[in-house]
Amino acid sequence: MRALAFLLLLVVSGAFAAPTPEDKLSRVFESIEGNRLDEALMRVDTLIREYPNFRLAHLVRGDLLLARSRPLQTFGNVEKTVPPEKVDGLRDEAFARLRALRERPADDRLPRSVLQLHAEQKHVLMVDSRRSRLYVFANAQGRPKLIADYYVTLGKNGIDKARQGDQKTPVGVYHVTANLPRKKLTDFYGAGAFPINYPNEWDRRQGRNGHGIWLHGVPRDVYSRPPRASDGCIVLSNPDLESVGQHVQVGLTPVIISDEVEWSDAADVERERAALAGALEQWRADWQSRDTERYLAHYSSRFAAPGQDLAAWGAHKRKVNGAKQWIKVGVSRVAMFRYPRERDFVVVTFDQDYKSSGLSNVMRKRQYWVKEGAAWKIIYEGSG
Amino acid sequence: MMSFAARLAGIVCALACALPAFANDLEDAAKHLKAGQHKQALERVNKALAAKPRDPQARFLKGLILTEQGNSKEAIDIFTKLTQDYPELPEPYNNLAVIYASQGQYDRARAALEQSIRTHPSYATAYENLGDVYAKLASQAYDKALQIDSSNTAAKNKLSLTRELVGRPSPTMMAAAPKEAAKPEAPKAVAEKPAAQAADASEEVLKAVNGWAEAWSKKDADAYLAYYAKDFKTPGTEARAEWEKSRRARITAPKSIAVGVESAKVTLSGAERATVTFRQNYRSDVLKSNTRKTLVMVRANGRWQIVEEKSG
């Protein structure tokens, strides 16, 4: 049994090490750069044999063949009669794939957004819209470790979704809410789909609407789609979606979508994490102390909870806390992510274990913290 | 639009043959073919083949006739067997490719043309055809990339090929001969029938011209320059060293060069001096040209060398 498991492990790790179609395409470009055009043509022929629907590979093959007949004017040297938008998508895909492969983060760089993962969150997904890339990080003792990255297609009109039908991909911190297998979907979604929780509380507060933002695959007749081609969804090739899917935990896996993944070093990330963790701990202690004014000092003047502004929240807390002889608050399974696009804005989720004379409850809580001056303040609080 | 300028190459020569009847039949068949009288052409060539069934030139001519008759299947059969019997001849590969291309089998056409060039690196016709086939394959690849269908243009190509075939000037003289001949590379391209000695001299001159073209095609600057006599008249008043330098640069710069010598005509003035006129079919990865060229050559120490070179 153990031997079998070991063997399986070998097979699985072998599969991870095998070059992806993108790696193979990259080798084609290497041959072209080295002016080894015959080798390039052989390599692209092999790639097309394996992935006959890889349209970009066909475009490169066309160029390599045409170059034997006459000098090329451009990448994707199709006849002038072809509408330019037809070939532009493939050109963009080529540049996006190449750029991402060339601009790999150094091993010691960490995404600045991921301040803390809780132990059960095995992975975090980050989307870099500028690079048309999805990065998969594993949770290595609370720290993100980059294990894979994939080319992705995003909304036709880019990112920063605000309205239903604007064909944009949202920017923010989300999580996967479901796993829809292939057999429940039409061919359009390919190998499967993972919906995310757009619009989240923050989006709603900003007046953003729309729905149905998913990570999903591609139809049978294509290998991949151009970088900006979806109605707002995050689209991966089917093999890529399947490998990402192995890392997804419904309800747990964060999906952070940003203009660009901001890379930072471990010391800076740790400094920010410690500052936030300190603020959270102080909030917990002050709540437990039943000194309601100290507790309320953690809330921003712009604070809002579902159906309550700061005045209503404060009045309620003063009344409740004043009636208690004792309060005990436990905070565990804390996750903290910087919010993309917003300045000094962090979403914190945790299990809140509240015990008091009279009432006890346990809930998953979500808070948005914002830096005002030198202090971190809570601007939103609700169930997570 | 992209014109598929496919040219069928003929190697029907007016070589004096052992059997005069055979030669006459072959000559007549070529004439009928040129006149578009395919049926008569086929009768004649079959008669010639009855006398010499293995003769490469007769078989080649039959292949041409069948191609023009639209009998691709039999034509392919004949040209394929010729490539098997005479793998060093580029023309049967080339013609196979033309037929494959006309059927839309561009991958096969490509393979045949690449083979043709491998056997004969300076074979300009194959280069031109191959360029067209690559362009066609590229267009197919682009169609797959863009998921469009440009098969309409493919139909146009086929039409222009048919016209090419009909209007083709018949027997082109080629500087190649079958395996059985003394030397495969030896030129047999003299249309006139001069005295035996003159024929030998002409042959030597042509051999030198072909060698010169081949050195150029191989981008072998040393070998190329060795074909120029010490007293070669450089263009303008350029010093020999300067001229050599610029020639060397021109020859080595392109990634590939193919120089074809076509319709060569040698005029001897005495035993030591000759004027050769021909069509120089030059093709490189950057330039393609077809010009009339005249070389004045002089024999010294048993070698024919160039003393004057004129274009146009």
Image (spheres, grey):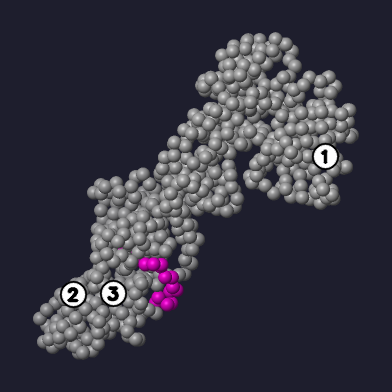
Residue A225 forms part of the magenta stretch:
no
Estimate the x, y position of residue B92 in percent, counting from the top left: 61, 26
Disc 1 crowd, CA 10 A, few/some/many (<14, 14-19, 20+): some
Q: Chain of mark 2?
A: A
Extent of the magenta region: A251-270
Q: Which residue is mark 3?
A: A348
- Kindly identify which numbered label has been placed on residue A306: 2
- Kindly identify which numbered label has been placed on residue A370: none
Q: Chain of mark 3?
A: A
The CA span between labels 2 and 3 is 17 Å
Estimate the x, y position of residue A250 in percent, counting from the top left: 26, 60
Q: Is residue A285 left or right of residue B142?
A: left
The CA span between labels 3 and 1 is 88 Å
Q: Secondary structure at mark 3?
A: strand
The CA span between labels 2 and 1 is 96 Å
Q: Which residue is mark 1?
A: B308
Q: Nearer the viewer, residue A332 or B267?
A: B267
Q: Is residue A121 left or right of residue B13?
A: left
For the residues tagged 2 and 3, is the chain the same?
yes
Amino acid type of disc 1?
Answer: Glu
Residue at 73% x, 40% y is B216
Q: Are marks 2 and 3 in contact (CB under 8 Å)?
A: no
Residue at 58% x, 44% y is A70
Which badge, 2 or 3, comes first in the chain's sequence? Answer: 2
Estimate the x, y position of residue A280 in percent, counting from the top left: 28, 80
Estimate the x, y position of residue A30 in percent, counting from the top left: 55, 53
Disc 2 crowd, CA 10 A, few/some/many (<14, 14-19, 20+): few
